[in-house]
Structure formats: structure tokens, C-alpha cells
Image (cartoon, grey):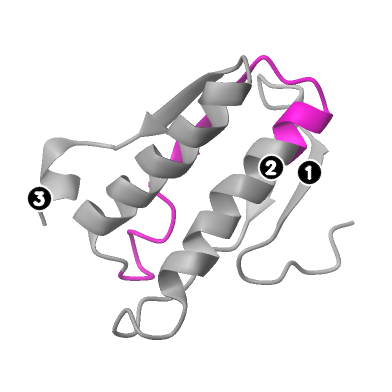
Amino acid sequence: MLHGCETGNAKITNGYRLPCKYVIHTVGPIWLDGKHQEQKLLESCYNTSLNLAKEYSCESVAFPLISSGIYGYPKDQALKVAIDIIGKFLLENEMTVFIVIFDRKAYLD
């Protein structure tokens, strides 16, 4: 049982019937105006998730573009955060990391 998860944090569960060993759950920030620690919280989502994946010896991890849907984080800024944080992680760690953007229209909206 997760018992909730704070914004910017992440927790891991088994994958159960999904075709994966684990599922990492993270809570991204709701975009207000960029002046309420949204970037710091989004960075923390990726950092905490990647560190959990490393701790559990995951060989790969896939991320949606966290907070860029209903939470309203601007997609271009969300993508930059994802690439920056994942890039820093990969400089020191060996793992395959996917960023999933569902379609070009989703990114350009």
C-alpha cells in the first residue's frame, strides 16, 4: 500500500500483472505560474524515480512527460527538465531511459 505520496517524491511497487517487474509512482507539480517551485518539484520527481530504479537494479525505466498533461506544466519546459535530469543521471549510471511523448500533437498543444 502506498499510503499517499508527496509532490516531488516517488514510491515503488511490484508490477503485478503488468509486463514489468516494478512500477514507480511519482506525483508531479501542478503548474501555477512557474514561481511556486514547480521546476524544483519536477526535477525531484525524476531524481527520486531514477534513484529508486537504481536502488532496485532496474535495467530500464520509461517516463511519461511528467506533469505536462492535466497538471498543465508547459510541455517544452517539462521536456527540458526531463532531458536535463535524465542526462545528468546517465553520466554516472548505466540504465536505458525512455521518455514517452504520446504524439506530436500532444507536444505541440
Circle nearer the N terminus (3, 2): 2
Q: In this figure, which residue is indicated by the disc labeled 2?
A: 24
Query: On screen, 82 above or below 86?
Result: below
Q: Which mark is residue 84?
A: none
The kind of residue on which mark 1 rests is Ile
Q: Residue at x 63, y 55 (%)?
A: 26
Quadrant for the C terminus in the image: bottom left
Q: In this figure, which residue is indicated by the disc labeled 3?
A: 108
| Residue 16 in view here | no
Mark 2, Cα crowd under 10 Å, few <14 / some 14-19 / many 20+, is: some
Magenta range is 52-72
The local secondary structure at tag 2 comes to strand
CB within 8 Å, label 1 to label 3: no
Mark 1, Cα crowd under 10 Å, few <14 / some 14-19 / many 20+, is: some
Residue toward you, 58 or 93: 93
Q: Residue at x 42, y 66 (%)?
A: 39
Indicate whether residue 56 is drawn in magenta: yes
**Measured Cα–Cα span from mark 2 to mark 1:** 4 Å
> Quadrant location of residue 30?
bottom left
| Residue 101 in view here | yes
Lateral position of residue 25 relative to residue 71, left or right: right
**Measured Cα–Cα span from mark 3 to mark 2:** 27 Å
**Measured Cα–Cα span from mark 1 to mark 3:** 31 Å
The local secondary structure at tag 3 comes to helix
In percent of width and height, residue 73 lies at: 31, 66
In percent of width and height, residue 59 lies at: 67, 14
Q: Residue at x 83, y 27 (%)?
A: 56
The kind of residue on which mark 2 rests is Ile
CB within 8 Å, label 2 to label 1: yes
In percent of width and height, residue 16 lies at: 80, 30
Circle nearer the N terminus (2, 1): 1
